């Protein structure tokens, strides 16, 4: 999966072989907003247009454009990974929730610090 970023929105897109087209959607919103193009230049342009249109519509109807998150989610991992994470959390004097939260924060910080992203 490939991604694009514009105005803090992320668009994901893939090549659809049977249609010979690039097809994408805006991530992180409640609604389904899609875009497509025949080339990278076209998919970028379509994504920008889709975001701008979506923001305009949200403003017109008084709707928050971004999906809200409740702050909790389930993660399925192998029993070995669960055990290893639990034991490492104990070694670090953390509970498993604190350990996972810290790991996610570290990954996000690493992505934010990446100069090529």
Image: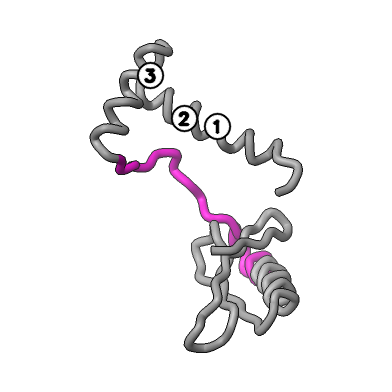
Extent of the magenta region? 57-77
Nearer-N-terminus badge (3/1): 3
Q: Is residue 56 visible?
A: no
Q: Nearer the viewer, mark 3 or mark 1?
A: 3
- Disc 2 secondary structure class: helix
Q: Check disc 1 and report its element: helix, strand or loop.
A: helix
Label 2, label 1: how far apart the Cα atoms are: 6 Å
Which circle marks residue 105 in the picture?
Answer: 1
Q: Could you tell me if the residues under marks 2 and 1 are in contact, i.e. CB atoms within 8 Å? A: yes
Q: Which residue is mark 2?
A: 101
How far separated are the C-alphas under marks 3 and 1?
A: 15 Å
In this orientation, which residue lies closer to the viewer: 31 or 15?
Answer: 15
Magenta stretch encompasses residue 10: no
Residue 56 position by quadrant: bottom right
* Image x and y of residue 46, in percent: 69, 77
Mark seen at residue 89: 3
Q: Tell me where residue 75 appears, x and y as whole percent.
A: 34, 42
Location of residue 78 (image quadrant): top left
Disc 2 to disc 3, C-alpha distance: 11 Å
């Amino acid at each position: 999966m490939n991604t694009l970023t514009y105005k803090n929105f992320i668009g994901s897109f893939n090549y659809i072989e049977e249609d010979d087209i690039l097809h994408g959607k805006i991530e992180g919103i409640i609604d389904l907003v899609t875009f497509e193009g025949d080339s990278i230049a076209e998919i970028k342009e379509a994504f920008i247009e889709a975001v701008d249109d979506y923001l305009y519509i949200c403003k017109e109807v008084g709707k928050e454009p971004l999906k809200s998150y409740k702050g909790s989610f389930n993660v399925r991992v192998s029993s070995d990974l669960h055990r290893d994470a639990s034991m490492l959390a104990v070694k670090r004097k953390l509970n498993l929730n604190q350990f996972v939260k810290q790991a996610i924060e570290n990954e996000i910080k690493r992505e934010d610090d990446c100069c090529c992203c």
